[in-house]
Amino acid sequence: SQQGEEDPQALSIQEGENATMNCSYKTSINNLQWYRQNSGRGLVHLILIRSNEREKHSGRLRVTLDTSKKSSSLLITASRAADTASYFCATDAGNAGNMLTFGGGTRLMVKP
Amino acid sequence: DGGITQSPKYLFRKEGQNVTLSCEQNLNHDAMYWYRQDPGQGLRLIYYSQIVNDFQKGDIAEGYSVSREKKESFPLTVTSAQKNPTAFYLCASSSGALVYTFGSGTRLTVV
């Protein structure tokens, strides 16, 4: 089952611009995570934000979480061509098995 | 270095043939997972295992089988009952912190 839905599905920007991706989910969560996938590779964990946190930073990444709206956003500042990848949100709803549920992803292209 | 290894990187299957994808981790993680990813799509859960000798079906288990005889290993068999197996398969593992570590994937193609 797919709980998270990313928006937009695809995003194309110029190097140096900021990229914003959004994730909406349906049920209460314990935490929300963002992962990155380069083409043809596995996913790599970027950042985790807990349900009692509203904002978190890691380098050029900024994640916000609004539990009242059941939504999160990932902002990549001063983007680089190397940021070109797909980005997925994943939610931990504390369900049976304590598994993550992944969204469909946003495909980001950063043009040099 | 600790990590999770999937092999082979590319696999070709003939019609009616069973194939097994390997997934090995040395992270001492209890939980392991198999996902299927179709082009331009998200991840769909096939099977997961929280502990050795136990595993559970995910959302799309039909046509697949797994075993978990060792903590380090969680092989996935794609059986002939899976009518559309061409996809990218990802294995992952996690500890109690629930941050997943992924392998680099196996691309399976039916020929």
Image (spheres, coloured by chain):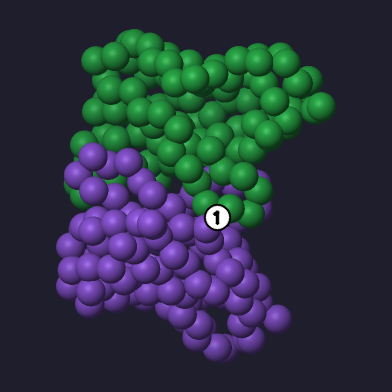
Amino acid type, mark 1:
Gln
In the picture shown, does residue A72 fall above or below A102?
above
Which corner quadrant of the image does residue B62 belong to?
A: bottom left
* Relative horizontal placement of residue A62, taking residue A107 as reference (left or right): left
Chain with purple colouring:
B
Instruction: Find residue B106 and report its horizontal and vertical position in percent.
Output: 55, 66
The residue wearing badge 1 is: B37
Figure quadrant of the C terminus of chain A: top right
| Residue at (29% x, 28% y) in the render | A31
Q: Which corner quadrant of the image does residue A54 belong to?
A: top left
Name the residue furthest front: B1
**Above or below, B88 relative to A90:** below
Residue A10 location, quadrant: top right
In this picture, is B10 found above or below A6?
Answer: below
Residue A20 on image: x %, y %: 59, 18
Q: Is residue A83 visible?
A: yes
The answer to whether residue A69 shows anywhere in this view is no
Q: Which chain is mark 1 on?
A: B
Residue A34 x, y percent position in the rendering: 45, 32
- x then y, percent, for residue B30: 21, 58
Disc 1 is placed on an element classified as strand
Q: In this view, does A26 lie to the left or right of B56?
A: right
Q: Which of A109 and A66 is in front in this view?
A: A109
Whether residue A90 sits left or right of residue A79 in the image: it is left
Front residue of A78 and B49: A78
Q: The green chain is which one?
A: A
Q: Residues within 10 Å of mark 1 (few under 14, many from 20)?
A: some
What residue is shown at x 73% (from left), y 30% (from top)?
Answer: A81
Please give left or right for residue B3 compared with residue A73 in the image: left
Residue at 44 percent across and 21 percent down: it is A58
| Quadrant of image for the N terminus of chain A | top left
